[in-house]
Amino acid sequence: MLLDGNLPVTCQATDKIGQEIGSLNGISGDVVSALSSIKQAINNVGEYVTSTAAAIEEQSTVTNEMSTSMQRAAAEAAAMVARA
């Protein structure tokens, strides 16, 4: 059984615990928000990497086609010189 003199101390402790829980809830919300922002940033980087890889693949294809065309043109020029 509690003595009446202990009641204010118990109430103060309960209030303090309630404040600490409220602070932890606020911090938890901030952490969730920060993690959400980090996740979005990672997704953005992933999209950038994917589009860059696609552009590099396309550039490689174009470069190969240009090389083939230039080799063909050089061979035709050499054949023309040989016939002249």
Image: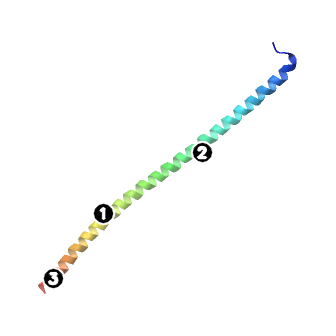
Whole-percent x and y of residue 52? 41, 58
Which of marks 2 and 1 precedes in the sequence?
Answer: 2
What amino acid type is highlighted by mark number 2? Ala
What amino acid type is highlighted by mark number 3? Met
Whole-percent x and y of residue 13? 78, 27
Q: Nearer the viewer, residue 39 or 6?
A: 6
**Residue extending furthest left?**
83
Residue that label 2 marks: 34
| Mark 3: few/some/many CA within 10 Å (<14, 14-19, 20+) | few
In the displayed structure, 40 sits above or below 6; it is below
| Residue at (70, 33) in percent of width and height | 22
Residue that label 3 marks: 80
Which of marks 3 and 1 precedes in the sequence?
Answer: 1
User: Please, what secondary structure does the residue beneath circle 3 have?
Assistant: helix
In the displayed structure, 58 sits above or below 5; it is below
| Residue at (18, 77) in percent of width and height | 76
